[in-house]
Amino acid sequence: MQPVNHFKAQYAAHRVLIAITYVILIFSLLYLLLHTIPLQKAKLWNEEKFVLKFKTNSFEYVVRAPNGSYCDDAKAIVLLPTRPTYGGLDARLAIRDSWLKSENVPKGIKYKFVLGLPQHASQSRIKKLNRMLKEEQDEYNDMIIYNLPDTYNNLFVKTGVLLQWQQKYCANAKYVIKADDDTVIDLHRLNKQLDIWFSAEAKQYKKLVWGQVLSNSTVIRNKEDKWYLAENKYDKEYFPSYTNGAVYVMTTEATAAILNSTEKVEDIFLEDVLYTGILRQEAGISIMNVETFYPEYWFHEYCENNMPILAGVYGLSTNSVDSMYKTLQSIDCSKPKSLNGSYEYVNRGS
C-alpha cells in the first residue's frame, strides 16, 4: 500500500476549498448584480439640472429625464402635483384605479404625477417614505420627482417644476392640464371639449389659460391671516384675474410665455395667483372662464350641444374619487340644461 502523502492531500483539499470559495464569490456577485439593477439604473439614467428663476430668488433642482419617445404622440399632458406621503400614495392609487385607468385615457393624452422630497421630523419616517416612493416608481414609472423639499409654502416651486418639465420633454403637446390629486376628470369628455371648444379659441388666442376664473381678489395684508402677503412681494391692492389652481388648462405657448416671464416678478406662495394671474398678466396671456371644472359642492349637469359641460370635479376625499368619477360619467344630456354665457373672456392684462 502506498504511503499517504499528507502534503498532496492537504494541497488537494486546499484547491477544493479555493474552488468552492470562487463559486460562492461568483454567485454572490451575481446575486448582488441582479438585486441592485434598479438602483444602478437609477444612477445611470440621465438626470437633468434645472433652475427656476424669479426676480430675487432662484431654485436649482434635478429631475430624471423620461424615455425619449414618451411624448412623441402627445396631444395633451396631465400633470398632477401630489404629496410624498402615505396620504399622497393613497390619492395616486385611487386616481390610477379610476380616471387614469388605461381605458379612461384617450390616445394622445399623457400624464405624470409631480412631487418633491419628503419632509418629516423623524429621519426614520423619511427613509420609509423614500423607500415607498422608490418601490412605487419602479412599479408605475409615472412620477416626476425633484430633489427639493415638498412643503405647502413651496407649492409654487412644484408648479414651476411641472411647467419646466413640460417645456423640456413634452413641448409638442398642445395643451397642459394641471390637476391636483384631489380631482377627478372625465378625460374622454375633456378631450372632446379640447377639440370642439378650446382648440377653436386657441387658434385666435395662441396663449390661453382655461379654467374657473376668480377676479377682483383683495391682497391680504393682515399678518395673522393664513393668506398674508407682504408688500415687497406684491404691492398692488388687488390680484389680476386668475384661475382656481385645483385644475386648469393652458396652451403650450402660454406655458412658454409664463416661464419666460418668471425673472420679472417676485415669487409668492399662492401658486395659482402667481402663474395664472401675475405671470399670465406679465406675459400678455388671455384667460377664459368656463364651467368645466368645479368643486364637489357646485356639481352641475349643464349641457351644450348634447355634451356635458362639467369635465372635472375637485376638492374630493380619496375615498370618494371612484364614486365621483362614476357620477361625473353618468351626466345625462337627454334633458338639456343649457348654461348661457358660461364662456367668458377676461381681457389681456386684466
Image: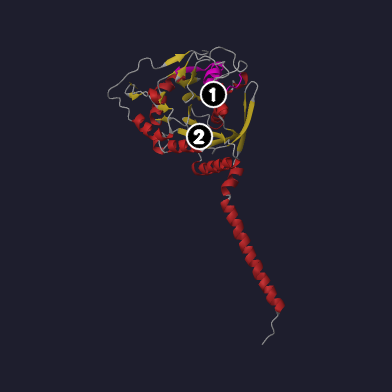
> In the rendered view, does 107 fall on the left or right side of 219?
left
Q: Residue at x 68, y 76 (%)?
A: 9
Query: Where are the magenta residues, as a range?
Result: 265-288
> In the rendered view, does 192 fall on the left or right side of 15?
left
The kind of residue on which mark 2 rests is Phe
Residue to which mark 1 is pinned: 271
The kind of residue on which mark 1 rests is Glu
Nearer to us in this view, 34 or 238:
238
2 or 1: tag closer to the N-terminus: 2
Give the spatial CA distance, label 2 vs label 1.
Answer: 17 Å
Q: Against 236, is 330 above or below?
A: below
Q: Residue at x 58, y 40 (%)?
A: 126
Q: Nearer the viewer, mark 2 or mark 1?
A: 1
Q: Which residue is drawn at 53% across and 41% down?
A: 133
Quadrant in the picture for residue 125? top right
* CB within 8 Å, label 2 to label 1: no
Residue 220 placement (x, y as % from top left): 55, 16
Residue to which mark 2 is pinned: 113
The kind of secondary structure element at disc 2 is strand
Nearer to us in this view, 45 or 98:
98
Residue 81 placement (x, y as % from top left): 51, 31
The kind of secondary structure element at disc 1 is helix
